[in-house]
Image (tube, rainbow, N blue to C red):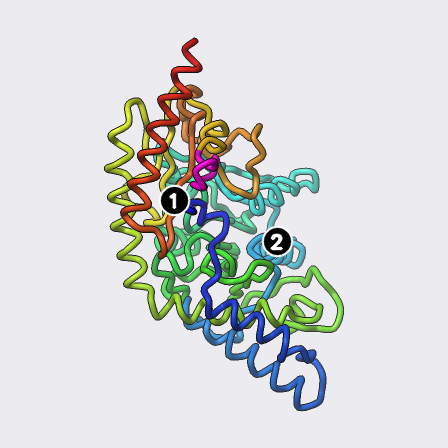
């Protein structure tokens, strides 16, 4: 099997699986219990929180565990807007955000808020001049991606945050970092954003677990009321197996960052060079982007058909974000970039991992060429 859909999810490391199984079998106490067993589990959660905090260079007290990136985005954005409505009613985001940011912010239009969506160029680079012009005294929130989940474009977040704060220091700057942590260098102290979302299963951890970084001076409303877990921000008994697995994943990916990052850079370069041997293609991913993501549009093909051809050989890619792919989905990212229809319909996303080899890429390219030629010949009939 050649698994090239690692932006959708990654295969958990063996150490992560062991931690999750051990937690299910042995660490089953409720962390909120007053007895020693419960306290021992609470301490293990603290270690996991410290591992994640070290990965992104923040205080452990600023890390809150959630069910995943989508919930983290919702807690940060809904929580801040609901708490701080007096600050204004203007919300700014981009046209190519993940649905968990874009769709929830669009929902505020019906509540009387002005929602501004900033455009991008053909490389999915944000129109920064337009962004800065839109920031005013009435702006309450700016929600942006760090790494785009379809194209791999990396926003210059540190520069953006600094400029936004110089215009209006009260604006919450929330960053969707799901495709960034463990893949590119993330130093949240240096970046200076107010909140940042993360997901476990994107870094060889378990599904169903994520985290939210929330700067210590930022006050938001809790969306889940109950027993007061996660310092009252997200009530509900903690997902101990998920948290401990996430903690191990964060620890290992930090230790192996340079090695795995360099490997991804090498694979991406080889992949792009190989893709360029196919006629009538367009590499959508810009040069200065995530080393793990390559989006390619292949003229006169159908991405979904190509995907199903490849899966016959146990080669797995995706047509767009796995959170939205359904066969009839039209990528809002490609549309915003102005990709022509004859190319857009043949767009696949190839996402590598620490396990992908040059030999894997050679086999993938061989089968890709074969199936592209087959699809094109059928479409010309």
Residue 368 or residue 109, whichever sits in front = 368
Is residue 75 placed above or below 50 in the rendered structure? above
Mark in the foreground, 1 or 2: 1
Tally the marks. 2
Residue 47 in picture, x, y percent from top left: 51, 79
The alpha-carbon separation of the residues under discs 1 and 2 comes to 22 Å
Residue 216 or residue 45, whichever sits in front = 45
Tell me the number on the disc at residue 282. Answer: none
Quadrant hosting residue 83 = bottom right
The residue located at (37%, 45%) in the rendering is 293
Q: Which residue is tagged 1?
A: 152
The residue located at (44%, 52%) in the rendering is 179
The residue located at (62%, 72%) in the rendering is 240
Q: Secondary structure at mark 1?
A: loop
Q: Is residue 247 left or right of residue 294?
A: right
Of all residues shown, which one is farthest toward the top? 381
Q: Which residue is tagged 2?
A: 74
Marks 1/2 in contact by CB < 8 Å: the verdict is no
Sequence-earlier tag: 1 or 2: 2
Q: Secondary structure at mark 2?
A: helix
Dominant SS in magenta: loop
For the C terminus, which image quadrant? Answer: top left
Magenta part of the chain: 310-319
Residue 30 in picture, x, y percent from top left: 69, 78
Q: Callout 1 environment at 10 Å: few (<14), some (14 to 19), or many (20+)?
A: many
Q: Please say whether residue 25 is one of the residues in the magenta stretch.
A: no
Is residue 368 placed above or below 31 in the rendered structure? above
Q: Please say whether residue 312 is one of the residues in the magenta stretch.
A: yes
Of all residues shown, which one is farthest toward the front? 313
Q: Callout 2 environment at 10 Å: few (<14), some (14 to 19), or many (20+)?
A: some
**Would residue 155 be seen by someone viewing this image from the given angle?**
no
């Amino acid at each position: 099997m050649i698994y090239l859909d690692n932006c959708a999810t990654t295969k958990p490391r063996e150490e992560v699986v062991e931690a999750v199984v051990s937690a299910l079998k042995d660490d089953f106490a409720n962390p909120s219990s007053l007895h020693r067993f419960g306290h021992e589990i609470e301490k293990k959660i603290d270690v996991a929180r410290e591992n994640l905090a070290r990965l992104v260079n923040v205080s452990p007290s600023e890390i809150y565990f959630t069910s995943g990136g989508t919930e983290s985005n919702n807690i940060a954005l809904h929580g801040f807007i609901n708490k701080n409505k007096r600050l204004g009613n203007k919300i700014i985001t981009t046209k190519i955000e993940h649905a968990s940011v874009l769709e929830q912010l669009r929902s505020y239009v019906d509540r009387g808020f002005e929602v501004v969506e900033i455009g991008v160029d053909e490389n999915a680079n944000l129109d920064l001049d337009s962004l800065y012009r839109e920031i005013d005294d009435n702006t309450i929130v700016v929600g942006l991606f760090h790494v785009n989940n379809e194209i791999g474009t990396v926003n210059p977040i540190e520069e953006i945050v600094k400029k936004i704060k110089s215009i209006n220091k009260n604006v919450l700057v929330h960053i969707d970092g799901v495709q960034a942590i463990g893949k590119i260098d993330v130093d949240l102290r240096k970046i200076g954003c107010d909140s940042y979302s993360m997901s476990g299963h994107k870094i060889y951890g378990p599904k169903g677990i994520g985290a939210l970084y929330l700067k210590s001076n930022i006050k938001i409303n809790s969306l889940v009321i109950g027993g007061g877990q996660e310092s009252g921000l997200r009530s509900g008994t903690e997902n101990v197996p998920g948290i401990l697995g996430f903690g191990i994943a964060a620890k290992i990916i930090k230790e192996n960052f340079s090695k795995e990052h360099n490997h991804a850079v090498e694979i991406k370069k080889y992949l792009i060079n190989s893709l360029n041997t196919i006629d009538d293609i367009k590499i959508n991913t810009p040069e200065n982007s995530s080393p793990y993501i390559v989006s390619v549009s292949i003229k006169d093909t159908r991405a979904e058909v190509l995907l199903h051809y490849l899966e016959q050989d146990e080669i797995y890619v995706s047509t767009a974000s796995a959170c939205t792919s359904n066969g009839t989905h039209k990528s809002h990212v490609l549309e915003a970039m102005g990709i022509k229809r004859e190319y857009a319909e043949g767009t696949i996303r190839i996402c590598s991992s620490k396990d992908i080899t040059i030999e894997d890429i050679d086999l993938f390219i061989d089968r890709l060429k074969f199936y592209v030629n087959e699809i094109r010949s059928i479409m010309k009939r």
